[in-house]
């Protein structure tokens, strides 16, 4: 089955710890994206990558880092510098100029 | 500044009671307008892409339309399984790469 997988579904961390969220796709899409969703707000773009070994900051990149070493994979690291990391994180992929397809999401709770 | 506003925030319907959701947008050079459905705790599911004013797309009980300033998602004779949050997003010429600008969504509840 073609699609996007994210793991884990739920993640709990202590404040001050870095954590990495996984995103894998087998749709052969060039572009991949990370969004953050908070209650009452629209999805906000964290980082995006249009090609392997290249990525760009989105609107809320501070406190996050990414890598794009393989076409299929686009992991997101939430660092201790992110002041409000508790949120629902969504990964998406798409072909240029077309619709994006989303993974099931990872709910991160930092206490 | 590119932005998307969805209304109403929440909508309650009886089964079979048709209605419409609104998505107003301001964007420089619209490349596409997208509708998604999101169930609680899950990722958005793609529904439609509209590219130019006057375009319409249909899928089961849903029909999306587009003008130069807004899009409507019409729901005909809804069923309880249509209950979800519906998200609207746009892609404009000025946006970073191919990223989307999302509205906050309309949460639809359909009761039997």
Image (tube, coloured by chain):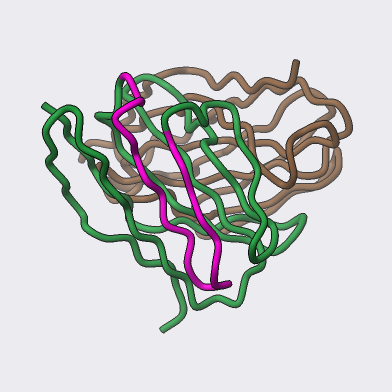
Chain colours: A green, B brown
Q: Residue B45: x and y, percent?
A: 45, 54
A20 or A2, nearer to the observer:
A20
> Furthest residue to the bottom?
A1
Side of B13 relative to B105 (left or right): left
A33 or B91, nearer to the observer:
A33
Q: Residue A73 lies in magenta, yes or no?
A: yes
Q: How many marks?
A: 0
Magenta segment, principal secondary structure?
loop
Side of B93 relative to A83 (left or right): right
A31 or B7, nearer to the observer:
A31
The residue shown at (69%, 36%) is B90
The residue shown at (52%, 31%) is A61
Q: Is residue B12 above or below residue A53?
A: above
Q: Residue A55: x and y, percent?
A: 64, 50
Magenta part of the chain: A64-83
Q: Residue B16: x and y, percent?
A: 37, 41
B5 or A36, nearer to the observer:
A36
Q: Residue A1 lies in magenta, yes or no?
A: no
Toward which corner of the image does residue A59 lie, by quadrant? top right
Toward which corner of the image does residue B12 lie, by quadrant? top left
The residue shown at (26%, 60%) is A7
């Amino acid at each position: 089955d073609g699609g996007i997988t994210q793991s884990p579904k739920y993640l709990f961390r202590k404040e001050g710890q870095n954590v990495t969220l996984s995103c894998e796709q087998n749709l052969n899409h060039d572009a991949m994206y990370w969004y953050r969703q908070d209650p009452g707000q629209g999805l906000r773009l964290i980082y995006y990558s249009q090609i392997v070994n290249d990525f760009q900051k989105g609107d809320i990149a501070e406190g996050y880092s990414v890598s794009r070493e393989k076409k299929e994979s686009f992991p997101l690291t939430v660092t201790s510098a992110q002041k409000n990391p508790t949120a629902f994180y969504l990964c998406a992929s798409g072909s240029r100029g077309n619709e994006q397809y989303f993974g099931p999401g990872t709910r991160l709770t930092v206490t | 500044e590119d932005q998307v506003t969805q209304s109403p925030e929440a909508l309650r319907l009886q089964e079979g009671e048709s209605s419409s959701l609104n998505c107003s947008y301001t964007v420089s050079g619209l490349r596409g307008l997208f509708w998604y459905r999101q169930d609680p705790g899950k990722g958005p599911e793609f529904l439609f892409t509209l590219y130019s004013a006057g375009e319409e797309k249909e899928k089961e009980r849903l029909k999306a339309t587009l003008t130069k300033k807004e899009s409507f998602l019409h729901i005909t004779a809804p069923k309880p399984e249509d209950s979800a949050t519906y998200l609207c997003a746009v892609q404009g010429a000025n946006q970073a790469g191919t990223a989307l600008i999302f509205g906050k969504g309309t949460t639809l509840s359909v009761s039997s």
